[in-house]
Image (cartoon, rainbow, N blue to C red):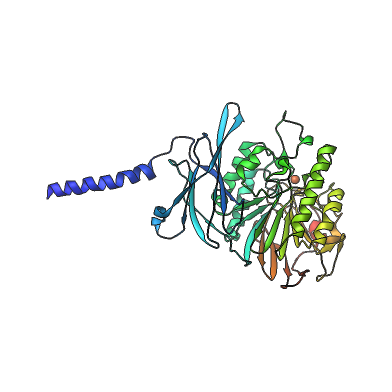
Amino acid sequence: MKRSRSYALAVLALLILPQILLRGAAAPPGVAPSRIILTWTGDPARTQAVTWRTETPLASAKAQLAPFTADPGFEKKAITVDGSAEKDDLGGGQFAGHYAANFQDLNPNAKYCYRVGDGQTWSEWNIFRTASASPEAFRFLYIGDAQNSIKSMWSHSIRAAYAAVPDARFIVHAGDLVEDGYNDSLWGEWSDALGFISATIPSFPVPGNHDLHRPPGAPDPKKVFAAPLLWRRHFALPQNGPDIEEMRSQSYYLDYQGVRFIALDVNVFANTDFVTDAKKRVWDTELEWLKQTLSKNPNRWTIVVQHQPIYDVAKGREYDDMRKALAPLYEQYHVDLVLQGHDHAYARTHKVAKDQVVAPTAPGVIYAISVSGPKMYELEDAHKNLMAAMIGQQQFFQSVEVAPDHLLFKAYSIDGAVRDSFELRKGASAVASTYVNHATAAPAATAKGITK
Ligand SMILES: [Fe+2]
């Protein structure tokens, strides 16, 4: 009896020990995956990209994937995918490892578990969901500039957004994610604020002016258009943008369930201090790409995401050249909605064409500006005649629901109050939508008393 009991204990130990070693062993310092960020490089119904980082650079990058089930035995069905590994010099003798992997041949409208690591040390299992292969209703989050006091004061903003819209399929970041795009510690704050959210809900980012900032002593920022390397390290994005090396991963498009989302880096249109030769080359090439991307578009809805606004509301700002270049294209190709940031306030136009408010059923574009971080700017009235809402001194997030026949936009201050809303309705054969305004406050009343 005694002998058989010892035998059973020995067998049990043999079974359990490898599990303890695999699951319970503490990882060596610096090799645990962090900053896990989902994005797409391809079809969101069939692929899912992920990036991550380790403090200590590692030679190997692995990701594992399995269909999500409630049964923890899903691990047995996991497949392993090789990723790419890069060693980045942070300066001062410090290095970090950045990694990327892409899951392919996925089923549409399905949930998967995944984890990332080097084959020895793994992250937790996270969950993502693929898009449907055809147009269906979904919601996404739209977020303006995070930029300042990111960990201390943007964290509660983005977490409020997630709590309010937990089924958001992705998060649109309309530029100026960080104050200085070269600063690795700010990217760390950005990731800390998001926590598991960026590992569960993909990001759809476009760079703002601050994301292009280069360190003191680096090549003159007036002569470069590419964001610092950290932008590409954190986001694996579609390589379908303008054929300009500097703009890779900064302008691109993605089709999601009947909507074409165009991320447009508008720094070349908005910044007046870029050098002339390079500016003309980037300007012309990007504009031609935009025309192609807008004209060859099989989706019923089109949404552009850009940082600097076409119709600004912050004091001392005006982007005439950009407006003259882009607004006619948006009108010609029936862009429904333009999501923007940069002005550190909330504002949203009625339906607009040729710089005028048009009838609810006429062709036209709606432009929104928002801010999610704590930095606030004073409002001005230059374009107040176009605005359905102008609200300062509040941190915001937005939920946008898109279905084949409607688009429902809701702007929330981060205390959860709906501060603005509108709807667009569109039939199967309609070119122009019908605009229904739900704004609750007139711009004149809300613009008063705003201070920096
Ligand atoms: Fe900005």
Picture layout, residue 352 above or below residue 125 = below
Q: Does residue 29 appear to the left or right of 412 in the view shown?
A: left
In the image, what residue occupies the spot 13% across and 48% down?
A: 2
Residue closest to the far left: 1
Which is nearer the eye, 188 or 332? Answer: 332
**Residue 340 location in percent, x, y?**
74, 53
Q: Residue at x 38, y 56 (%)?
A: 73
Q: Position of residue 282 (x, y in %)?
A: 79, 43
Q: Which residue lies furthest to the top in this view?
A: 93
> Observer-nearest residue: 372 or 198?
198
Image-based side of 98 in relation to 446, left or right:
left
Q: Tell me which image quadrant ligand 1 sits in.
A: top right
Can I make out residue 333 in this image? yes
- Residue 318: in sight, yes or no? no
Asked if 240 appears above or below 364 in the picture, the reply is: above
Instruction: Please tell me whether residue 141 is drawn above or below residue 56 in the rendered image.
Output: below
Q: Where is residue 129 in the image (x, y as percent from the top left)?
A: 54, 58
> Considering only vertical position in the picture, is 96 above or below 102?
above
- For the image shown, how many numbered marks are present on the structure? 0
Q: Which of 162 and 378 is in front in this view?
A: 162
Q: Position of residue 368 (x, y in %)?
A: 75, 57
